[in-house]
Amino acid sequence: GQLSSSSRVSGPSSPSLGLLLDSLELPQASSRQTLVSGVMAQSEVESNVITYSAAISACGKGGEWEKAVHLVSAMVLHKLEANTITFSAAISAFEKGIQWEKALQLFSVMPQSKMECNTITFGALISACAKGSEWNKALQTFGRMAQTTVEPSTITCNAAMTSCEKAGQWENALQLVKILAQGDVELDAITFHAAINACVVGSQLEKALQLFTETVQSSLELDAIIFNSVIAACERAGRWEKALQLFGAMTQFKVESTSSSCSVAISACENAGRWARALQLTNALAD
């Protein structure tokens, strides 16, 4: 589709962007030109902001973040003004390449270029920080959204929640759920799954079970992943009866159990010395 005029930069962005590109430890300008010319030469369409943005996005999806930055560099050399879509595509490329530091660097240039961020920009940056195990920076970025006109979306919220999950930051995860529940953001299964896992990683079984109950009450469609998380948490905490209760509830909620669900439930019984129950469950599953 066509880019709207509002997405273009009101002034030249080359100086600050050029300095940033130099700081990313990429080849010199002449080498960059050689690298990108081959990419763009393969296309017969005119090289403009739209085609460059599309090419940058394609590089990101292909895991070629270095090529994505070379294309941004080529825009500077061709005196093309990058826009929000261009930057968002480049940050997404960094996110997929787990280059959170470079994503933050590129993000920092946007205000200097008088460029507005959007949901995609924030979502990609938060996700990049989460993948780099930088949960604190992910949450800081999420907090910065409140200082802009960008409304949080389910995607950006889930990206922030995932950062809490990976680090076992259960207190931040619970606080985030509370904040989101009070807003207009629609919580989904991914939100609750990440929050539950954050509690599990943080050895907070009761909090995880509480969140599971909230998930049930929210009328969201439950899946085996959520069940497996809480069943595994019960198994590690020696709560074999609760593990079996949750395993049995999968049928009630029409969720098909997986091999992981079965093995963890059996393991919970074995670890608690409930050999008869473990054998009974094994035989029942074999039938």
Image (cartoon, helix red, strand yellow):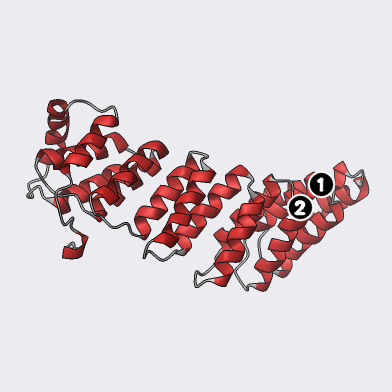
Disc 2 on helix, strand or loop?
A: helix
Q: Quadrant of the N terminus?
A: bottom left
Contact check, label 2 and label 1, Cβ < 8 Å: yes
Residue drawn at the location 51% of the way across and 51% of the way down: 139
| Image quadrant assignment for residue 151 | bottom left
Residue 22 got which mark? none
Residue drawn at the location 15% of the way across and 51% of the way down: 49
Q: Give the percent coordinates (x, y) of residue 192.
A: 61, 60
Reading the image, the residue beneath label 1 is 237
Q: Earlier in the sequence, mark 2 or mark 1?
A: 2
- State left or right for residue 71 relative to residue 217: left
Density class for disc 2 (Cα within 10 Å; few <14, some 14-19, many ≥20) is many
Residue 205 got which mark? 2
Density class for disc 1 (Cα within 10 Å; few <14, some 14-19, many ≥20) is some
Residue drawn at the location 74% of the way across and 46% of the way down: 203
Q: Amino acid at mark 2?
A: Leu
Disc 1 on helix, strand or loop?
A: loop
Q: Amino acid at mark 1?
A: Ala
